[in-house]
Image (cartoon, helix red, strand yellow):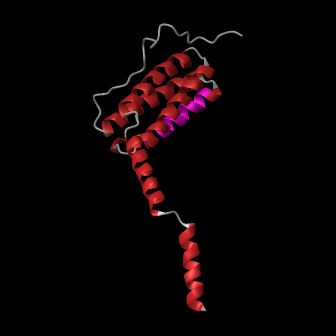
């Protein structure tokens, strides 16, 4: 009786599982999707850093104009880009140094929340210097960031708009 039960149980189990043709089709689909995923566009670290540089400039002019809403938006964009770097550029050794930027980001975020122009300026200097320190630590010292002197876009008004 026991051999018969084992035989029936194995037939039931075998009947419930996928057949070899289905398994082959699924494996082929997985291979195809893996190749497609490998070909998808992934921004490089340089693209992300260029974006940060633009937001760094805009952040300065927003803070200078005491446009705290715009300054908050721009620091948010920088934070978002840093998060994207940590997500999409895990293969780059440089991202291990990104943690050094966190205190400067926190400082400028605090200045914006307080709407404090003096704290904003000193925090912006800290942010700028930290960018350069990171570039130096990662052998990119040729990329020197400075406090902007010319707005990045001639078609954006950084002054607070009256509602």
Give x and y (percent) for residue 15: 56, 69
Question: Magenta segment, which residues?
Answer: 100-112
In this rendering, position of residue 143 left or right of residue 102: left
Q: Residue at image x 57%, y 14%?
A: 65
Viewer-closest of 55 and 106: 55
Screen quadrant of the C terminus: top right
Q: Residue at image x 54%, y 78%?
A: 10
Magenta highlight: main SS: helix
Give x and y (percent) for residue 43: 40, 33
- Is residue 109 something that shows in the picture? yes
In this rendering, position of residue 3 left or right of residue 49: right
Dividing the picture into quadrants, the one containing residue 143 is: top left
Screen quadrant of the N terminus: bottom right
Give x and y (percent) for residue 82: 47, 36
Q: Is the residue 10 above or below the residue 59 in the image?
A: below
Q: Residue at image x 48%, y 57%?
A: 22
Q: Residue at image x 27%, y 28%?
A: 142
Give x and y (percent) for residue 48: 42, 31
Give the residue furthest to the bottom: 1
Q: Is the residue 19 above or below the residue 124 in the image?
A: below
- Is residue 97 something that shows in the picture? no
Q: Is the residue 134 above or below the residue 9 in the image?
A: above
Give the residue furthest to the right: 163
Residue 110 located within the stretch drawn in magenta: yes
Viewer-closest of 6 and 125: 6
Total numbered circles: 0
């Amino acid at each position: 009786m026991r051999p018969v039960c084992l035989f029936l149980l194995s037939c039931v189990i075998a009947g419930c599982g996928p057949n070899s043709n289905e398994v082959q089709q699924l494996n082929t689909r997985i291979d195809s999707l893996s190749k497609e995923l490998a070909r998808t566009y992934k921004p490089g670290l340089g693209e992300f850093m260029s974006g940060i540089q633009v937001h760094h400039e805009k952040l300065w002019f927003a803070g200078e104009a005491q446009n705290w809403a715009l300054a908050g938006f721009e620091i948010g964009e920088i934070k978002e880009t840093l998060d994207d770097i940590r997500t999409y550029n895990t293969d780059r050794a440089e991202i291990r140094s990104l943690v050094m930027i966190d205190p400067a980001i926190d400082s400028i975020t605090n200045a914006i929340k307080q709407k404090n122009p003096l704290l904003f300026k000193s925090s912006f200097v800290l942010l700028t210097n930290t960018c350069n320190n990171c570039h130096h630590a990662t052998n990119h010292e040729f990329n020197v960031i400075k406090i902007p002197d010319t707005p990045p876009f001639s078609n954006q008004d950084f002054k607070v708009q009256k509602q």
